[in-house]
Amino acid sequence: MDNIDLLIKELGAHRVKYNEPLEYYLFRKDKIVAQFFYIATNRRELEKILELCSKLKIAFLVFGNGTKIIFDKEKIRKLVIRNRAAGLRIVGIKGKIDKGNLPVGKQVVGVDEAKVEIDSGVSVSILNEYLNKQGLAVPVWQSSLNGTIGGSLLVDPRMLEKCEKIKIWDKGHQEISPAELRNKHIVLSVVMNFKSAV
Ligand SMILES: Cc1cc2nc3c(=O)[nH]c(=O)nc-3n(C[C@H](O)[C@H](O)[C@H](O)COP(=O)(O)OP(=O)(O)OC[C@H]3O[C@@H](n4cnc5c(N)ncnc54)[C@H](O)[C@@H]3O)c2cc1C
């Protein structure tokens, strides 16, 4: 049995597409075909597919929103993985809780700073919307609003600066510092610090 058949057996035939035109997923609508194509809809699926590729020795390529990626061939003979892992969660806050005389549930929570864990498939515009809703200051990013965090980190020094830690895949899960990030790493998620907007 071919290794790609083993992958399909594990994930289900409906999840791995053959000869998929990538123009639907690429910002520039290039006429490129992926021999095998998979969409990771969350971080668990992204980690699982990377683990399977590693175990089954299947060559793969990950992309996000396809605003920047350029393919050197019209047919990609690898498993092309579209990353749509788009979770966002607050994992820590620094600040004060001012209870005042307000009833329970209406107490004022003042946050000076928050740590946000962001999946690599979150687009810059969705991150900005989230920060606005949480009352956190939106930084001036250098990369496009359409790109994902995973596709932007290495080209946007301001974004890298904001990171406290980065979860990557490099033949296994690892947590690294921003200074350790390299081209070969697949970014799974990042933790960034944001100040309050006020
Ligand atoms: C209109 C426009 C304006 C732009 N302006 C700027 C700009 O001012 N400055 C700038 O720097 N860039 C700019 N870009 C480039 C681009 O927006 C960014 O690099 C972008 O953030 C890439 O994100 P993406 O999800 O589209 O990446 P993709 O195009 O999907 O991928 C780009 C590269 O990143 C890799 N990649 C994707 N996801 C991951 C991941 N999770 N882990 C590891 N590698 C990954 C891919 O394999 C590929 O090599 C612009 C693009 C457009 C269309």
Image (cartoon, rainbow, N blue to C red):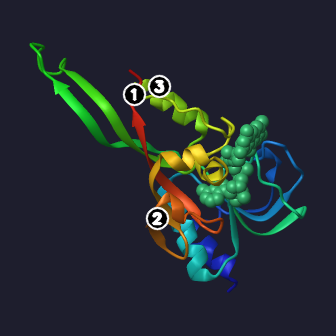
Q: Quadrant of residue 46?
A: bottom right
The disc, 2 or 3, on the residue closer to the chain's N-terminal end is 3
**Outermost residue toward the bottom in this view:** 1
Q: Amino acid at mark 3?
A: Asn
Q: Amino acid at mark 1?
A: Gln
Task: Tell me what residue is drawn at x 38 percent, y 20 percent.
Answer: 198
- Answer left or right for 149 relative to 89: right
Residue under label 1, please give it: 134
- Tell which tag, 2 or 3, sits nearer the viewer: 2
Query: Is residue 19 at all visible to an observer of this figure?
Result: yes
Task: Tell me what residue is drawn at x 39 percent, y 33 percent.
Answer: 195
> In this orientation, which residue lies closer to the viewer: 150 or 82?
150
Q: Is mark 2 within 8 Å of ligand 1?
A: no
> In this orientation, which residue lies closer to the viewer: 153 or 64?
153
Residue under label 3, please give it: 132
Tell me the crowding category of disc 3: few under 14, some 14 to 19, or many 20 or more residues within 10 angstroms, Cα based. some
**x and y percent of residue 126 in the render?**
56, 34
| SS state under label 3 | helix
Residues under labels 2 and 1: Cα distance? 27 Å
Tell me the crowding category of disc 2: few under 14, some 14 to 19, or many 20 or more residues within 10 angstroms, Cα based. some
